[in-house]
């Protein structure tokens, strides 16, 4: 039995968004070591502030300043911090109701251990040394022996110099992918510049890449079939937006290609031909780079275009 392959994979999508007046004031306030909330229709002070009333869904703008100290309402210990989390040493995730607020803010508490954390304990904000107008301007919370602030939240205009109007929120997922035995065999064959699919024992269709089971019949596929390497362009699109970290000049073409002997089209980039000359029925073949594990792109073979009837079922 062949060994199943594994590989680390990263999915990353930094999301850029503009801010409305409430979120802009809140994040700019953090930069200035000021925590703002908003007063809802039922009189509660919501922190972090929302742009719409949680009860009526009406837009709300009545900003107030609350304290930088608060009370832990609930918590959970994090013994193994991950990349990008507020602290690199073990810490507690806490919900903190700041003085003057009626809702809780989620953040990290720097504590020596879980025995030092309890519901109802007093904490205060530890501000980041460099603040840019983001939730990370609160570096974390830390234990506080002081008493609660009895003062009421104070009205605030929400106006600051050089207000933050937009943010980029990083979104990233790191994981280890295991393709399973079927696709491991497929990937190993690609290393030898071979393209291998599997045939369904019931409908006899050949699937590339193989899935381990026929999506039509639902039965296991274990008969390997070598296909291609040539194929036919069934459909395609022209890409005009350059992707980050992808060293391909735009415009370029991505196409579905029905490899000879396969009953499922795979997608790949088309090269070796101007983008505006790519067409349905174009006959193509793979181009492998030195030490490449899979085809870098497909190029025209010079053969006559395939007849539409030969690939219409794979569109």
Image (tube, rainbow, N blue to C red):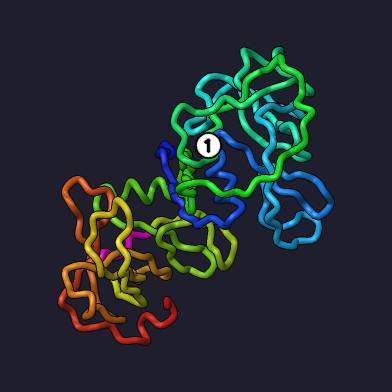
Q: Residue at coordinates 68% horizontally, 32% vertically from top-left?
A: 67
Residue farthest along the right direction in this orientation = 42
Query: Mark 1 = which residue?
Result: 32
Q: Residue at coordinates 45% horizontally, 62% vertically from top-left?
A: 199
Q: Residue at coordinates 25% horizontally, 66% vertically from top-left?
A: 250
Q: Can residue 260 be seen in this view?
A: no
Residue 279, percent from left and from top: 27, 81
Q: Residue at coordinates 44% horizontally, 39% vertically from top-left?
A: 4
Query: In the rendered image of this protein, does residue 237 appear above or below residue 115?
Result: below
Q: Main secondary structure of the magenta part?
A: strand
Does 220 sit left or right of 151 as displayed?
A: left
User: The residue tagged with tag 1: helix, strand or loop?
Assistant: loop
Q: Quadrant of the C terminus?
A: bottom left
Q: Can residue 193 be seen in this view?
A: yes
Task: Let me know if residue 52 is in the magenta part.
Answer: no
Front-most of residues 193 and 169: 169
Residue 134, percent from left and from top: 51, 41
What are the residue bounds of the magenta stretch? 225-229
Residue 171, percent from left and from top: 49, 46
Does 150 sit left or right of 52 as displayed?
A: right
Front-most of residues 84 and 105: 105
The number of callouts visible is 1
Residue 174, percent from left and from top: 46, 39
């Amino acid at each position: 039995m062949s060994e199943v392959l594994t590989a680390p994979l990263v999915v990353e999508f930094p999301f850029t968004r503009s801010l409305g007046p409430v979120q802009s004031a809140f994040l700019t306030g953090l930069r200035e070591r000021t925590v703002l909330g908003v007063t809802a229709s039922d009189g509660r002070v919501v922190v972090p502030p929302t742009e719409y009333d949680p009860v009526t869904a009406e837009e709300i703008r009545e900003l107030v300043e609350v304290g930088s100290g608060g009370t832990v309402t609930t918590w959970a210990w994090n013994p193994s911090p991950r990349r990008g989390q507020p602290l690199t040493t073990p810490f507690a995730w806490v919900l903190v109701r700041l003085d003057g607020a009626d809702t809780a803010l989620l953040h990290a508490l720097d504590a020596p251990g879980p025995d030092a954390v309890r519901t109802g304990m007093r904490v205060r904000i530890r501000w980041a040394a460099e603040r840019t107008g983001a939730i990370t301007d609160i570096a974390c919370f830390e234990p506080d022996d002081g008493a609660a602030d009895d003062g009421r939240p104070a009205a605030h205009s929400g106006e600051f110099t050089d207000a933050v109007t937009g943010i980029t929120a990083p979104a990233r997922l790191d994981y280890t992918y295991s393709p399973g035995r079927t696709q491991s065999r497929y990937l190993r064959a690609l290393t030898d510049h071979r393209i291998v699919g599997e045939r369904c024992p019931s409908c006899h269709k050949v699937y590339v890449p193989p899935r381990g089971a026929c999506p039509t019949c639902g039965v296991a596929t274990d008969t390997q079939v070598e296909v291609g390497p040539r194929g036919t362009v069934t459909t395609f699109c022209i890409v005009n937006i350059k992707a980050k970290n992808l060293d391909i000049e735009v415009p370029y073409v991505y196409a579905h290609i029905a490899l000879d002997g396969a009953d499922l089209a795979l997608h790949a980039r088309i090269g070796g031909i101007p983008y505006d000359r790519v067409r349905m029925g174009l006959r193509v073949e793979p181009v492998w780079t030195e030490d490449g594990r899979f085809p870098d792109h497909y190029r025209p073979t010079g053969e006559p275009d395939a007849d539409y009837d030969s690939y219409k079922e794979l569109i």
